Image (tube, rainbow, N blue to C red):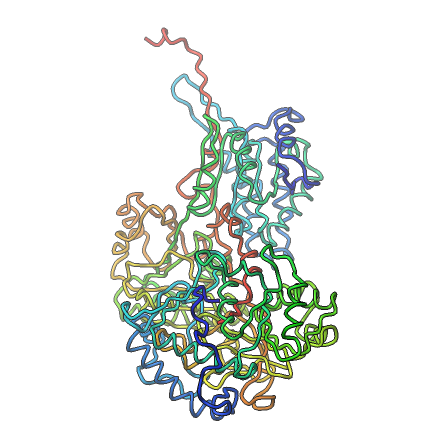
Amino acid sequence: MIISPRFPAGPDRSLTGLLDEMSGDVPGGPLAVGDPRMVDFLTAFGRTLLDPALIRRHPELAPLGFFLRRAELDAQLARLAEPGTGSTRVLRFPRGLVFHIPPANVDTIFVYAWALAALTGNRNVVRISPRSGPAAELILERLATALQDAHPAVAATQRMITYDRDDRITEALSAACDLRVVWGGDHSVASVRRAPLGPAARDLTFPDRASFAVVGADGWLAADPAARDQAVVGLYNDSYWFDQAACASPRALYWVGDPTTAAEARTDLFERLAALLAARGELPDPAMAVHKRVAAYGEAAAGRAAALGFAADEALAVLDLADPLAAPRTWLGAGTFPTATVARLADLVPMLGRRDQTLSHFGIPEDELADFAAALAGRGIDRIVPFGAALSFAPLWDGYDLPREFTRLTTLGTVPAQARR
Amino acid sequence: MTADPSTGPSTGPGTDSAGAAEDFVFGRTQAEREEILLPELQQLTEHHRANCAGYDRILGALGIKPGGAGGTIAELPWLPVRLFKHHDLASIPPDEIFKTLTSSGTTGAEVSRIHLDKAAAGDQTRALSRTLQAVLGKQRLPMLMVDTPSVVKDRRSFSARGAGVLGMAGFGRDHTYVLDAEGRPDPEAVRAFLAAHGDAPFLVFGFTFMVWQYLYEVAAEHRLDLSQGILVHSGGWKKLADRAVDNAEFRARFAADTGLTRIHNYYGMVEQIGTVFVEGPDGDALYCPDFADVVVRDPRTWREQPVGTPGVIEVVSTLPKSYPGHVLLTEDLGVVHGIDDGHWPGKRFSVLGRLPRAEARGCSDTYAESAAGPAEAASADPQGEQAA
């Protein structure tokens, strides 16, 4: 069982040796929730990401850098304070060893989950996919830089490794860990779950999710041009950063309003988006351009799309849904927007379910959004966010409060039981 | 590659009664293709719209009115070839399906399904025969198969390679395999074949990388004389790129070391079964048979590229009548070198390679990634270039 250590980087070695090493004593004592040694390291790492040259190439790293500022981390820790009940105190501790299996191609998401698990004092093993992209490499470089000045407890407790699919390695890590964090599709989750966990360990899974965007037609037309352009930039970031394949990227865009107003608003939004794409020189590579045609023609052949439009040198594809409530949840390629108009936001409620994650919105009043959430009643949609925030990672993700998931509670009572009679 | 062994000629090319001149299928200029093929292709578009609901929905969704498709061959609406891997598109009722062909899907899940009725199956066989006769002549020649007999033995687990070998077998006689049943080179068998047939024209068939690895290297080593051979090969250059062998090198080395100079690469795919684009005698490019054409497109605008500018290859053929495959955008890159300026009239072009597979940078593929890794799958696929 040979793995390649990526952080701290080193020659290939056996997993058994690595696990033995991680179970030893931590220099300076075990990590606590919010351990200053770890906070210092995470903030130092975050600073290396807020490098303008790096952000120009990988804009998705900027939010990560901001997320790792000290004030932000302190706010997360403050949220964890437990008031206790009566005379019983509640103490919060790290869960132990956390094994992370992040998505292969969304380069940054694993860093958020790992950082929160590290902030809460856990020992972590993160499997970096052999297929990870260039941003992942840069992240590993910056982690190595930050490690130079970090307390040795960091290197002793945090590991990022790469291995080709090998069930024995996954099994050994699953047996050793206290919490397993599995990102990826339903198939990946099912595949990982074949490896048993220890009796007290548990899974935190992030399976296939789909997300949607909604625009109030009246709200769009009432917004001034600058606000519309800003919304288009937000939609662009939500959709194009990860080739529209992130689970929080919208898979379809809905107009809420009467058909005439919606048609006018729609023309305006897509013209602005096409102009933005042209200005940014956003061009799909030929393989993506072909893929988008395959996917769009397939939706038409199956009768799900009634009209297809292509613009901005293939960077933008717009599909008119034949049945508004039969929205595709599969990936149709970067910059593909199935779209339809509904009279009221509540009309979408019947089509949404557990697998639906994020609703990004523009031009819809807050009380309407709140009524919509109440009507859904938790059956689906974990996040309702404005345009541009779909991909902003939050410690509350997929319905979980991650810092709480990464910790466990010990109660401490001091008043004898009989005295309470 | 068809997985159906019976798509090759059942009687062989020598049985057609028409004379060689009128059967010659590399004779039309580009202007003649526009004049003769365009009306046929427009009719095919309307035929498929009337008989294939999915095709009609696509053209309708693109805003193309019935009867309004394409004033030139390049303006005809195309389908991406991969659509046949996800959708069953046929222009014949299910009870008239005589034969269903599947492509050489390397991942199992992704194979094209091409439906032929009796007439279409006959058409494609005749078209292929006439095309290959242009380089082979009308006689069935003794045939050297650059493969192992095992590849066609087990018909239940028929491989793409096996289908190609069997499909071509009908163009020759007295077949001899260059590899033995265990896949080891069998120079003695080749020597015996050459002793019997090597003084007159004979046919050699195989996949490009096998021809290089097992025929060239063995023939060069054993100083075998292949000067009377006519080699027909397909399958792409990807596997030979590691050995720094391209088409020019391939031809030069065969000529210098074995005397083999009559070499014809060809390009075709199961989604346009029966249509193959054949390398001319000069080895300078692939040529289109008279019932076919190519259009190289700019992947940003999909407009036709000028001569000399690479793009995505679209293949056009009047053969597909039972499914809407008469105008297909492939996932191969290519370039048109010239029009009406080569050994044969029409466009002459080269295939430059395959488009990489568009991959989602999504959240939904972590652990399942490697079981049938896309990278391996692509390298095992013979560039989508198919024997018929």
Quadrant in the picture for residue A214: bottom left
Vertical relation: A6 (above or below) B336: above
| Nearer the observer, A299 or A158 | A299
Q: Position of residue A90 (x, y in %)?
A: 45, 22
Vertical relation: B78 (above or below) A215: below
| Nearer the observer, A110 or B112 | B112
| Nearer the observer, A124 or A233 | A124
Q: Residue at x 59, y 30 (%)?
A: A35
Q: How many marks?
A: 0
Q: Position of residue B106 (x, y in %)?
A: 50, 58
Vertical relation: A60 (above or below) B55: above
Q: In which quadrant will I find the N terminus of chain A?
A: top right
Q: Residue furthest front?
A: B196
Left of B15 or right of it: where is A30? right
Q: Residue furthest top?
A: A418
Left of B273 or right of it: where is B193? right
Q: In which quadrant will I find the C terminus of chain A?
A: top left
Quadrant in the picture for residue B235: bottom right
Q: Residue at x 34, y 80 (%)?
A: B64
Left of B20 or right of it: where is B213? right
Q: Position of residue A14 (x, y in %)?
A: 65, 35
Q: Position of residue B215 (x, y in %)?
A: 66, 67
